Amino acid sequence: MSTIKFKSPLDFAQGPPTSVGQLAAKGWMSGAKAMQHELQFSDKEMSDLILVAKGKADIDDFPNMFESLYGYYMSEMPYGTAKARDGCPYEWISEKLWDELGGSTDITVYD
């Protein structure tokens, strides 16, 4: 389990963060680390996720990862895409990962 370090007590002027996403938004935890914590992915699973985000692996190769990410992004995904009517959820998630983690350097990639 990773330790979260806060910048200063003044960071709580508006109240403490209530989610990992808020920690990431305030710069207290990187986006990749926040996602890893929220999805409860192991380092190896996160390494695989980064490979998918960088386009070096296909999300189809990791069905459990897809299921976790589908739930994680469900509220952001357009309804027609989520139901595979207007778009492909696999493609949408892959593009979202590229946008969010494609340039991530804070996770070690294990081959």
Image: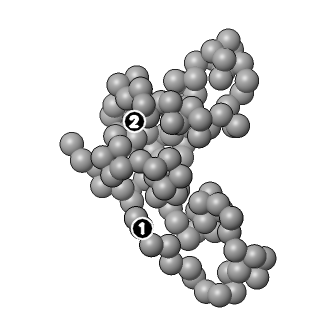
**Does 22 appear above or below 49?**
below
- In the current view of this chain or complex, which residue is farthest to the bottom? 9
The image position of residue 33, as x and y in percent, is 46, 58
* Residue 11 image-quadrant placement: bottom right
The image position of residue 98, as x and y in percent, is 49, 39
Identify residue type, mark 2.
Answer: Val
The image position of residue 85, as x and y in percent, is 67, 12
Q: Which residue is label 1 attached to?
A: 2
Question: Can residue 9 be seen here?
Answer: yes
Question: Can residue 103 be seen here?
Answer: no
Q: Which mark is residue 28?
A: none
Q: Quadrant of the N terminus?
A: bottom left
Please indicate whether residue 66 sits to the left or right of residue 12 in the image.
left
- In the current view of this chain or complex, which residue is farthest to the top? 85
Residues under labels 2 and 1: Cα distance?
23 Å
The local secondary structure at tag 1 comes to: loop
Q: Which mark is residue 52?
A: 2
How many marks are shown on the rendered structure? 2
* Residue 45 image-quadrant placement: top left
Please indicate whether residue 97 sits to the left or right of residue 108 in the image.
right
Residue at image x 36%, y 50%?
42
* Residue 87 image-quadrant placement: top right
Residue at image x 45%, y 72%?
3
The local secondary structure at tag 2 comes to: helix
